[in-house]
């Protein structure tokens, strides 16, 4: 397993070891002990999610407030996405900062996004299957969002030569300055 830090402490790119042979490949897509070792956490995952989206679909920026804040371990099993995490932990030295990583079925990259972050992605391929584990259950009453193109955050989303496709909810998310964020962790 290869772990690469990002510009935001605690957000990590994880690449499982892939065993390729004439049949294809095998990898341990998740191993709790190895995950705990590389992240220095002992968070358990309680829910697996799977969404499929077409090219140009942007889902985000989403998070759940405490006590339902979710850590997310995200990956792509078909296609490609540009995945983004935004630090919204009050008092963090990287508050309001973002990191983006291209996750594809081919590169097998995963992104570990701890609780305290807003998360979103845009699909780069014709379709993409996006799978992720969360450390807390879905709690719609605590579901919150931030506008994907908030100029204060300034995410440099890839130019796909098309308007992004968003849910009605995501077109109406608040700006970071008006959003409920996380107390210092
Ligand atoms: C997230 C979630 C949703 N739902 C239901 C609620 C809606 O009826 C339907 C679609 O939900 P939504 O439009 O919020 O799905 P996404 O836009 O993919 O939301 C996710 O997208 C971004 C990228 C995230 O990081 C979050 O995990 C999550 O907010 O699934 C559930 O039943 N359980 C769940 O855990």
Image (tube, rainbow, N blue to C red):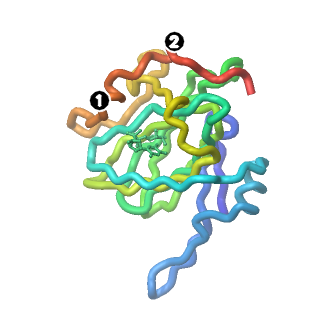
Q: Residue 98 at what x, y percent from top left?
A: 53, 30
* On screen, residue 70 above or below 169: below
Residue shown at 56%/25% (left/top)? 97
Instruction: State the CA–CA distance, disc 2 to disc 1.
Output: 21 Å
Instruction: Choose top left, top right, bottom left or bottom right for residue 78.
Output: bottom left
Question: Which residue is at 59% across, 48% downward?
Answer: 134
Could you tell which of marks 2 and 1 lies nearer the N-terminus?
1
Observer-nearest of 88 and 157? 88
Circle 2 residue: 177
Q: Residue furthest left?
A: 162
Q: Residue furthest bottom?
A: 22
Mark 1 within 8 Å of ligand 1, using the beta carbon: no
Relative vertical location of residue 139 with respect to residue 87 in this rendering, above or below? below
Left or right relative to 21: residue 82? left
Rendered image: mark on residue 184:
none
Task: Name the residue rendered at 62%, 44% in the picture.
Answer: 136
Per the image, the residue denoted by label 1 is 168
- Dot 1: what SS? helix
Q: Position of residue 18 (x, y in %)?
A: 57, 72
Question: Within the image, what quadrant is residue 65 found in?
Answer: top right
Callout 2: SS: helix
From the viewer's perspective, is 14 left or right of 62?
A: right
Ligand 1 picture quarter:
top left
Q: Quadrant of the C terminus?
A: top right
Measured as percent of width and height from the top left, residue 29 is found at 58, 65
- Would residue 166 appear left or right of 110 to someone viewing this image? left
Q: Nearer the viewer, residue 91 or 160?
A: 91
How packed mark 2 is, by other alpha carbons closer than 10 Å (few <14, some 14-19, many 20 or more), is few
Q: Is mark 2 within 8 Å of ligand 1?
A: no
> Pointer 2 and pointer 1: residues touching (CB < 8 Å)?
no
> Disc count in the image?
2
């Amino acid at each position: 397993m290869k772990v690469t830090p990002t510009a935001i402490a605690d957000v990590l790119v994880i690449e499982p070891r892939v065993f390729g042979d004439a049949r294809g490949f095998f990898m341990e897509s998740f191993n709790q002990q190895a995950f705990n070792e590389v992240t220095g956490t002992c968070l358990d995952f309680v829910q697996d999610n799977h969404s499929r989206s077409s090219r140009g679909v942007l889902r985000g920026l989403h998070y759940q407030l405490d006590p339902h804040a979710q850590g997310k371990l995200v990956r792509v099993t078909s296609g490609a996405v540009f995945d983004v995490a935004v630090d919204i932990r009050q008092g963090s030295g990287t508050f309001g900062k973002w990191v983006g990583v291209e996750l594809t079925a081919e590169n097998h990259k995963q992104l570990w996004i701890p609780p305290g972050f807003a998360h979103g992605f845009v699909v780069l391929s014709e379709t993409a299957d996006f799978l992720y584990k969360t450390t807390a259950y879905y709690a719609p009453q605590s579901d919150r969002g931030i506008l994907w193109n908030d100029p204060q955050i300034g995410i440099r989303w890839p130019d796909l030569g098309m308007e992004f496709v968003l849910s009605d909810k995501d077109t109406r998310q608040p700006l970071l300055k008006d959003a409920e964020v996380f107390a210092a962790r």
